[in-house]
Image (spheres, rainbow, N blue to C red):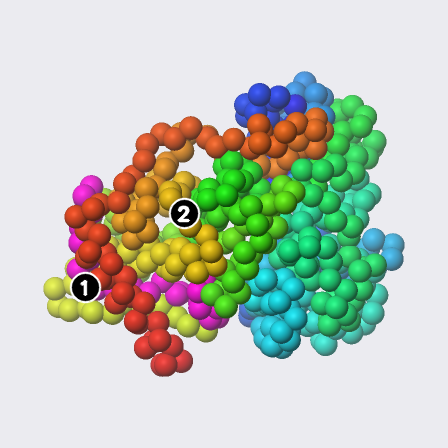
């Protein structure tokens, strides 16, 4: 058996698979987010340990025999979080999370230093780790002076599990301290934030062993000795491992609260000017690119709240057949946008409203607006040298065939829908645990799921969608001028 532990913002998921990669069972433990000030988002790392214990206890209650057979553990977690420890490994302050925006000024200052984009291949976003440390140095100097270790959230769990200060390449690529092409810490970038490599965890590939489960935890969980803990991955790279998105040209689109267009690359292809994320993948000699939009299903849920209808009611109102755009355009920038604009202050809008604009017209515009935002990410990836021929859809929004038809037509790419199953970050983490424990060939493990069906672009609407996308693209500069 192999165990995947995924540390999410709202909780920890533990998932067991067997040697044939069949899911045996899963359990969860909840986490809370602390918001002491506007724009702040924090968690107490002790909460992660408690939630992990709860998840493992849930598995043990129903699958104790299977848990006893675990030979490898893989870790996944939300990226960019700043977990600060002193020289005795005590936590110095709550972890500053990925969606915390307090360090926007520090991020802009670091991004103005050309070495950051040149070495990391990425814009320094406010959510990344380096600007958080710059903020701590400025506003909490007494804490900064005590920092012995800076760990990412899943790597704090690793420390608790194994006693090792280690991280993997994919998660570390989101710190703004990694030389992404060389897959190594950059001393010059660390020095720019008053740190050194001795304060960073050692680096391994996500498929490599990165510690052994402590004997007291193994005993308490009913496991044997020598359980290997893999390097693991950041959450999106782990999801890609779960989806089998590891080869050149393979891609998925995730329609969750936010939206992600993820493409695997056999080489390093940065393009920071278009706000594409260029990170190491969880496998050796592999990288990936991501276009990220901040409101995907979040936009539809906002519209549902405004109209007093559920999201499913709104989409049912549109029928089963994709229609041509009506001329009403929705910009889904409800909390700003990443790709391609890197704009935290821009906000959303409906454009082209008339007396005839019904609720269904607005719903259609919301679906199209998200589809066009994902098209923006596709165009950004193309400018970075990546060509895609099809994508696989995951996430809650992928349950709407109509929305997938809109995305397929906007991208002019077929969209594959996987057969039922759990292919998320916890499953990808379990796969990483399997590879680390058995030295199996990653290509034989990270296979894609079977495709249940494919949603093709609607050829008769291609021209209408292209016209609507061009109109959509002209609106951002016009709205930007109002801010």
Which mark's residue is nearer the viewer, 2 or 1?
Answer: 2
Which quadrant would the C terminus be assigned to in this image?
bottom left
Identify the element where label 2 is drawn.
loop
Q: In terms of depth relative to the viewer, which is nearer, 472 or 25?
A: 472
Cα distance in 3D space between marks 2 and 1: 28 Å
The answer to whether any part of residue 260 appears in the image is: no
Q: In terms of depth relative to the viewer, which is nearer, 344 or 43?
A: 344
Identify the element where label 1 is drawn.
loop
Where is mark 1, residue-wise? 327
First to last magenta residue range: 319-344
Mark 1 crowdedness (10 Å alpha carbons): few <14, some 14-19, many ≥20: some
Magenta stretch: dominant SS?
loop
Q: Is residue 275 above or below residue 109?
A: above
Where is mark 2, residue-wise? 388
Q: Which mark is residue 191?
A: none
The x, y position of residue 294, in whole percent, is 45, 59
Residue at the image point whose x is 75% and y is 25% from the top: 223
Which quadrant would the N terminus be assigned to in this image?
top right
Residue at the image point whose x is 39% and y is 65% from the top: 333
* In the image, residue 326 lies in the stretch drawn in magenta: yes
Residue at the image point whose x is 69% and y is 47% from the top: 168
Residue at the image point whose x is 36% and y is 29% from the top: 452
């Amino acid at each position: 058996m192999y165990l995947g532990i995924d540390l999410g913002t709202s909780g920890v998921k533990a998932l067991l698979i067997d040697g044939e990669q069949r899911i045996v069972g899963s359990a969860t433990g909840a986490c809370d987010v602390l918001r002491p000030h506007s724009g702040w988002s924090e968690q107490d790392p002790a909460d992660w340990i408690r939630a992990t214990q709860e998840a493992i206890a849930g598995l043990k209650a129903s699958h104790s025999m299977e848990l006893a057979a675990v030979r490898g553990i893989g870790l996944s977690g939300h990226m960019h979080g700043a977990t600060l420890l002193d020289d005795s490994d005590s936590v110095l302050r709550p972890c500053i999370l990925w969606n915390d925006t307090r360090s926007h000024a520090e991020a802009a200052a670091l991004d103005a230093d050309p070495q950051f984009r040149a070495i990391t291949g990425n814009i320094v976003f406010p959510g990344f780790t380096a600007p958080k440390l710059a903020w701590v140095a400025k506003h909490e100097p007494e804490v900064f002076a005590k920092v012995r270790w800076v760990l990412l959230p899943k790597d704090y769990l690793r420390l608790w599990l194994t006693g090792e200060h280690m991280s993997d390449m994919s998660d570390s690529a989101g710190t703004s301290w990694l030389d992404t092409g060389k897959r190594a810490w950059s001393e010059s970038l660390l020095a720019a934030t008053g740190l050194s490599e001795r304060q960073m965890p050692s680096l391994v590939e996500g498929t490599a062993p990165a510690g052994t489960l402590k004997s007291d935890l193994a005993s308490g969980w009913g496991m044997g000795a020598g359980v290997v803990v893999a390097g693991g991955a950041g959450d999106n790279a782990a999801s890609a491992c779960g989806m089998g998105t590891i080869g050149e040209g393979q891609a998925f689109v995730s329609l969750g609260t936010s939206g992600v267009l993820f493409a695997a690359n056999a080489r390093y292809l940065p393009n920071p000017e278009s706000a594409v994320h260029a990170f190491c993948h969880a496998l050796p000699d592999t990288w990936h690119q991501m276009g990220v939009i901040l409101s995907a299903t979040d936009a539809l849920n906002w519209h549902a709240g405004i109209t007093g209808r559920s999201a499913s009611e709104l989409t049912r109102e549109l029928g089963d057949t994709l229609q041509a755009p009506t001329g009403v355009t929705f910009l889904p920038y409800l909390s700003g946008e990443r790709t391609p604009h890197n704009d935290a202050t821009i906000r959303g809008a409906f454009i082209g409203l008339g007396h005839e604009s019904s609720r269904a017209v607005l719903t259609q515009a919301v679906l199209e607006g998200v589809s066009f935002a994902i098209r923006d990410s596709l165009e950004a990836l193309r400018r970075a040298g990546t060509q895609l021929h099809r994508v696989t859809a995951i996430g809650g929004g992928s349950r709407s065939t109509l929305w997938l038809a809109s995305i397929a037509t906007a991208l002019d790419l077929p969209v594959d829908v996987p057969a039922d199953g759990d292919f998320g970050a916890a499953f990808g983490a379990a796969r990483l645990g399997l590879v680390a424990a058995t030295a199996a060939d990653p290509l034989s493990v990270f296979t894609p799921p079977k495709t249940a069906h494919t949603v093709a672009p609607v050829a008769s609407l291609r021209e209408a969608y292209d016209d609507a996308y061009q109109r959509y693209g002209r609106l951002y500069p016009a709205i930007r001028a109002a801010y």
